[in-house]
Image (cartoon, rainbow, N blue to C red):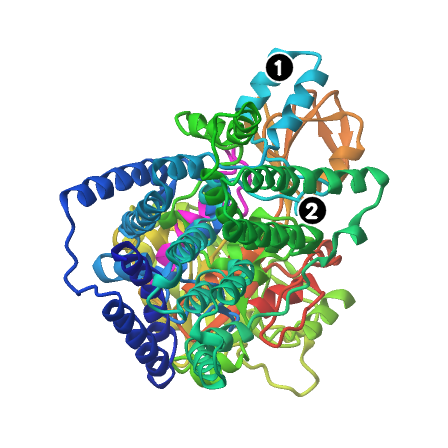
Amino acid sequence: MKTIVLILLYLSLPLFIFWWGWFEWWVALPPSLALGYFLFTFCKSSEIHLRITFGSIEITLLFACLLLALFWTYFSGVGGFRPQHFDYYKHNLIFNNLVRYDWPVRYADGSYLCYYHAYYLPPALLAGWVGGLSYVHYFTFGWTWLGLGLLFALLYRLNGWKLVFLFLFFNSPEAILLIYDAFKSSNFLHFLKDFWQNDHTIELIKSPGGLLFHSHVDSFIATPQHALPAWLSTAVLLTLWKEKSKAPLTSLPFVLVVFLLYWSPLVAVGFLGLTLYFSFVQKTLVFSSFSNVFRLLFFVALLSYPALIFYAGHVPLNEVNGWWWSFLNTPKDAVFLVVFIVLEIGIWAVLIGMGYKNQTISKRDFNLLLCSLLILLGLALYRYGHFNDLARRASLPALMVICWGLSTLSVKKPLMIFTLGLCAALPLKQHFRWLSAQPYSAIVDKKIKEFTPYSIHYLSKYHPDSFDVTAQYLGKADASYLRYFAPDVPSKPKEVTRAFYYWKSTFQLTDYEKKALRRYNIQRLYVKFFDVDWDISTRQAVPKAAIRFVENPPLEVIPTVFITNRTLEKLSWGGVDELSKKIAEKIQNLNPSPLLRQGEEKQPLIPSGEVQIDCDWSLATRAKYFRLLTQLKKNLPNSTRLSATIRLHQIKFYRTTGVPPVERGMLMYYNMDDWKNIKTENSILDLNVAGRYADYVSAYPLPLDVVLPVFRWAVVYRNGRFLRFVNHLTHRQLQAYPFFKKSPLPNAYRVLQNGTFLGIPVRRGDLFRVEESTLENLKISTQTLAQEIQNRKVTFALYHLDSLNLTYYAVPTARVFLPQGKGVQDPVQQLFQTFR
């Protein structure tokens, strides 16, 4: 019972953390008292003192189990010390968000992290206490290792090392299908190479989401948050089953169901069937009277209601579900369904039946094993979830019971040896692959800390658009949980001003652009008034490309001036003050005076507005630039705010590059890589590059606005050197021309012959690299920045207003869930709605 007590404490600890970290105290107190009383009563009735002692044999056993658990935990990738399975994109991102955000975790769109957190909470809490993301992988490793060590210790007590090692290599005999493939293969050596290098989990009928029961090692590799609680709870139940009437508390199986409700509701579904059968067979006092039944139900409800409140706020899921025969499209699919049932259930049924016939398995144990087989059969016939998640998770307890039952059989018979050999083939291969540099076909390329600053929405990057994976982890912004039961009052949403940049030399809006301003409720335009560059002939700073107003702007205009860095390099200190005066005068003289009505007096364009300066200053020009901004502020009307554009490198290294003396900064979340480098993948918007800087946004000492790119271009190279830009060019246009060939370089096309393309002379060997901002990357960036920017009042702008830019995003490709649960089909509208 000592091991069971430790397991119960292990399973219950996350519940206490969840109740007190994610709910008001008056919600957390009743279940905490109830569970505390249960644990105390269990220890007392089991004659276990709070001070648990171990004999020398028990210490040796525990050490061996912990050593074996250490091997599994380390090589499976827990903590990121070894390569991790693809599913760790989710695990690492959840750990990251739990450490970085206050609890309950709220996102910029008002939603909250709504998932079964039990596995993740203790490591995240400890990491938050002692040092944040730098330590969470250590606590994750230790927490998982402890749970696995307790499991191995209890398995040993159930049936010795025989059960422990059978558990390590337990799987269905699906390897027989690989033997069939080997005989069909024309090149056996090629088959062996493929068998070693690739994952060969057998998934029939559909992929993803096909018929599949995971092996134990595969379950632990990909989904420890499901596997650990399933195995621990089932091992405890089997211990109670084995000890029969010696079980101290008959309500314990139902408490385990409640634990699983917090750890993994899908596992709880499969475990509930075993619990009901256990209680029926035991004929315990639980069902002896109405009062006992009522007390049990009340106790279970008291422990469960926080989870039900929490899960009730989940966003609606359009999960695939139904009986499997409704998904069968061909007679071949029907055959596969039969094959699956035979391999995953039928063979176990034969072996268990033989054990019962030979009296190796008692009638009582046989009935429990038969119950487990029926649970597996039911799960095999019904599909729920995009990846058939219910069957894969809910099957874990029943498979554990079958593993225990098979461990009681003799392994001396040839049929048993052959069957177990088939079962162990794939798990054994995985154990050997753990020792290689590529233990899985798909490996996570980010550790927990490297997911900063992304929210859970970042998962959409790794799944197809047709499957909204992010929705699985989100609760609605208007959920009752947040309104009535969450511990903190939700922070007020950002006051967002929508804006566009206008970067043309003539201000004249097309009808499409005017409609876009109304459709997206744009409140502000950042209009480039002119550039300031160094004139070599006159050796002074001069305005260039000044704007000409053909019509009056329909809304507030923020004059924007671009200053080249070489201007500041050439400018003398004495010329800085003079330049500030000229810029102020030029701005105020550029209002659309030709459009004034007769008798109307000319008014300054910015009587009480804002002026923005755009300059990528360097360390050498920092002092001059900051002096220029200070003097410009003095030369503008008193009520005028001054803002400056900020690049990503200036965000991260602001202690070196300095913070400009302005009221606000406009974060330019684009042009983030070297477009002159022919090997650059996308200089406009690259999430990998952005990830190196974005986590520093929240620490920047200025209030920040943000602008994202909605433009595209092609960068043209000749002889490996930059030649020119071609605006609005797309992949489809280049693919349609016969004298372009796809290059091995990312997003690039090689010219095959001399000629003219769109009026541009090209030569054989020229390289065109298409760069664009995909809607998915823009959405991820928007969600990231909405979370990282700390000031409540913020301008969210897109660069830049142009009919060709906007029509490129005219076809919707995805949905964004708003706080009300409604989708917005216009992609540009999605971006504006997402930033909140």
Q: How busy is the neighbourhood of tag 1: few (under 14 within 10 Å), some, or many (20 plus)? A: few
* Visible residue check, residue 41: yes
Look at 56% across and 53% down and name the residue there: 367
Whether 693 is among the magenta residues is: yes
- Horizontal placement of 738 versus 608: left or right? right
Q: How busy is the neighbourhood of tag 2: few (under 14 within 10 Å), some, or many (20 plus)? A: some
Give the residue at the far bottom of this rendering.
599
Q: Which residue is mark 2?
A: 728
Q: Which residue is mark 1?
A: 190
Closer to the camera, 725 or 263? Answer: 263
- Horizontal placement of 4 versus 241: left or right? left
**The quarter of the displayed image where residue 72 is located:** top left
Up/down of 257 relative to 53, above or below? below
Look at 61% across and 59% down and name the residue there: 800
Looking at numbered disc 2 in the image, what kind of residue is underneath it? His
Closer to the camera, 431 or 588? Answer: 431
Up/down of 261 relative to 227, above or below? below
- Look at the numbered disc 1 and give the secondary structure of its residue: helix
Q: Which residues are magenta?
A: 671-698
- Of mark 2 and mark 1, the one earlier in the sequence is 1
Whether 695 is among the magenta residues is: yes
Q: State the image coordinates of residue 488 (x, y, percent, origin top left).
A: 37, 80
